[in-house]
Amino acid sequence: MSAVYINSASCISVQDTLNENILQNLKPENTSQIIKAIEPNYKEFIPPAMIRRMSKTVKMSSVASHYALKEARIEQPDAIIVGTGMGCSQDSEKFLKNVIDNHEEFLTPTFFIQSTHNTVAGQIALGLQCHAYNFTYVNTSSSLEFSLLDAKLQINDGEAENVLAGSTDEQTDRTMELYRLNNTIKKDTDLPVNYLQSDTNGVIWGEGASFFVIGKDKTENSYAKLKNIHISNKVELNEVQDFIQNFLAQNNLSTNDIDAVILGFSGDAESDVYYTKAIDLFPDSSQLYYKHLSGEFNTASGFSMFIACHILKEQQIPEVMMINTQKKDSVKNILLYNHLAGSDHSLVLLEKA
């Protein structure tokens, strides 16, 4: 497959990622169990009557996609592809509560209609009056990667020239309660978290939406070249290094060619061992981590992709993300490695545009 270009990148996250100087203003968070996204003033983008009917994930995605299209100077994408792990969980919870409260009778269909995972892609298309290819991927932590892979295939097959691809996930009160009960979220007693040397299980949970315009041609705004993506549902611990090296070999690269590797250390001792194995392959690369800035969630890799794009474009590596002290004079190749609780491993290879 030939490479495609990331011509714009937009992100709403627990960092102030809609403003300028993003790489200089990143602030780590390790003392809260749950961290919430910094939301824009939605009234500037969405009519007030519509805002009331939209869940948080739809609102975040609508604004993030607006910024991505505006930066790429595209009014109508040739495809809209969204990845999400949990979809519109707020409306799902409202619908299920309605079912229980009304004893399964006299239900209004609104919450059910708005609770489906493809609501986000549908609402973006409605806002743009876009009748092109519209698809949603729900593959837990590799949802964004599947969306990017689809976007790449659409462009390589000549079906599209510019694709809006992104990911989104929101928090909901009931789901967070359940995550606390089953120890997905760290206990209060385990805070603050040392992300790189944690000896306790569980994570700090975040949320956010990240959108990118993937294009066939390079533009003056291009952030990066999307070289390749590899996804595997299961990787054994003793296979991690082969998993990465084989992927690089397919792209005619070795570990020495990777200027920066971005790993998804989450503070969960049980699953972070995969990253510890991976990091040994890159002694001469800038080793970076990011979930102390974004929190863990199904599509947290969208945040790392957004930051990687800025690193390639600005040729700067934020100190707050560094694991080792290796700093390259120029950054050409970045490898992103992510998984969620040991499942759905993904590798994304980006190159300077």
Image (cartoon, rainbow, N blue to C red):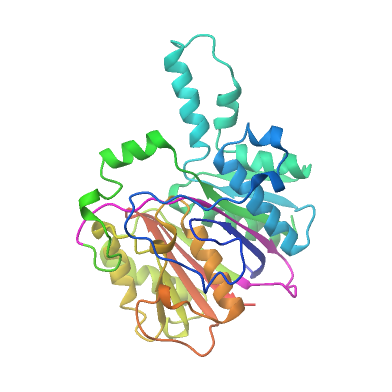
Tell me: residue 172, above or below residue 186: above
Residue 131 relative to residue 152: left or right = right
The N terminus, quarter of image: bottom right
The residue lying toward the viewer, choosing from 160 and 127, is 127
Taking the spot 70% from the left edge, 36% from the top edge, the residue there is 48
Query: Which residue corresponds to the image point at 49% horizontal and 26% vertical from the top-left?
Result: 94
Please check the rendered image and state whether residue 219 is part of the magenta-colored stretch, yes or no.
yes
**Place of residue 197 in the rendered image (x, y in percent of width and height, measured from the top left):** 24, 68
Work out which quarter of the rendered image holds the C terminus and state it.
Answer: bottom right
Specify whether 77 is left or right of 4.
right
Q: Position of residue 221 (x, y in %)?
A: 72, 72
Asked whether residue 79 is drawn in magenta, I would say no
Q: Nearer the viewer, residue 164 or 345?
A: 164
| Residue 160, horizontal then vertical, whole percent | 74, 56
Q: Nearer the viewer, residue 27 or 112?
A: 27
Q: Main secondary structure of the magenta part?
A: loop
Residue 51 location (% of width, % of height): 65, 37
Q: Is residue 113 above or below residue 37?
A: above
- Region of the chain picked out in magenta, as a range: 199-225
What residue occupies the far bottom of the structure in this picture?
Answer: 329
Looking at the image, which is closer to me, 138 or 44?
A: 44
